[in-house]
Image: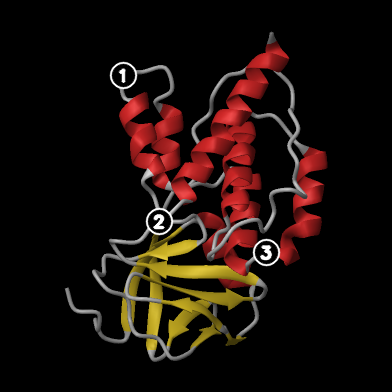
Amino acid sequence: MATNVGLVIPVSAPPRVAAHLRAAADGPAPVVHRGPDAVYVDVAGRCVGLVGTRATAVPCALRSVLDRVPDVVGAQLRGGVLHLDDQALGVGRVVDVLVPRITVAGGPATIDVAGLVGRGDGLTPYGDDVLCGWLAVHRAAGVATPEVDEAVRALAPTTTLLSATLLDCAMHGEVIPEFAAWLGALGTPDEEPLAAALARVGHTSGRGLLEGATRALDELERVAA
């Protein structure tokens, strides 16, 4: 599929991404990362992406049906619409990125936030992925973690913008499709193959998410016992 689809690239948007674009002031959006499968820009201090069909559909990204995303030079926000060079990203529908609800009997567990935030390489360090999985499970269980959330927000500037944005997404219960599918299949025959699919996401991101989520589930079970 060609990357040049005219002046508008149709996309779907997670609800908070769409709201953030509408609320942000017009102006340049510095490019954080560009590649053939995804491009990420800084919109008012929050990372917003455009992903193609081969990229991970992170909950802070606009999703397209492109095989390759445009080779972007610059980006800007105009009237609540993100433009990559001369191409507008037209939001046609909203996509659900929330975790499925799960039932637990325990209260909040704890985790070493300072020992994890920013620890690892790449756009999403492994320690941040572990935290995202841990936080998302608590949100799925409806269990608040105010002290952990406060520590994550305080340390967010010490990691990458994309990772900080994904940590915020996790605190709001927003996850990638592979995580939601696995969590929704807990206790069923699909759990194991979906865990394997999650573990294959990215270089290490899926394994980090799975580690953090499994740790949270184990801790919640212990607290409930």
The answer to whether 123 appears left or right of 153 in the picture is: left
The residue indicated by pointer 2 is: 57
The residue indicated by pointer 1 is: 189
Secondary element type, mark 2: loop
Disc 2 marks which amino acid? Ala
Which of the labelled discs sits on residue 159, or is there none? 3
Disc 3 marks which amino acid? Thr
For the residues carrying marks 3 and 2, which lies nearer the camera in this image?
Answer: 3
Residue name at image x 46 percent, y 51 percent: 204
Mark earlier in primary sequence (1, 2): 2
The answer to whether 220 appears left or right of 49 in the picture is: right
For the residues carrying marks 1 and 2, which lies nearer the camera in this image?
Answer: 1
Residue name at image x 40 percent, y 86 percent: 72
Residue name at image x 61 percent, y 85 percent: 26
Q: Are marks 3 and 2 in contact (CB under 8 Å)?
A: no
For the residues carrying marks 3 and 1, which lies nearer the camera in this image?
Answer: 3
Q: Nearer the viewer, residue 82 or 122?
A: 122
Secondary element type, mark 1: loop
**What is the quadrant of the N terminus in the image?**
bottom left
Secondary element type, mark 3: loop
- Residue 113 image position (x, y, % from top left): 75, 46
Q: Nearer the viewer, residue 163 or 95?
A: 163
- Residue 10 image position (x, y, % from top left): 32, 71
Q: Residues within 10 Å of mark 1 (few under 14, many from 20)?
A: few
- Residue 78 image position (x, y, % from top left): 53, 85
- Residue 172 in view, yes or no: no
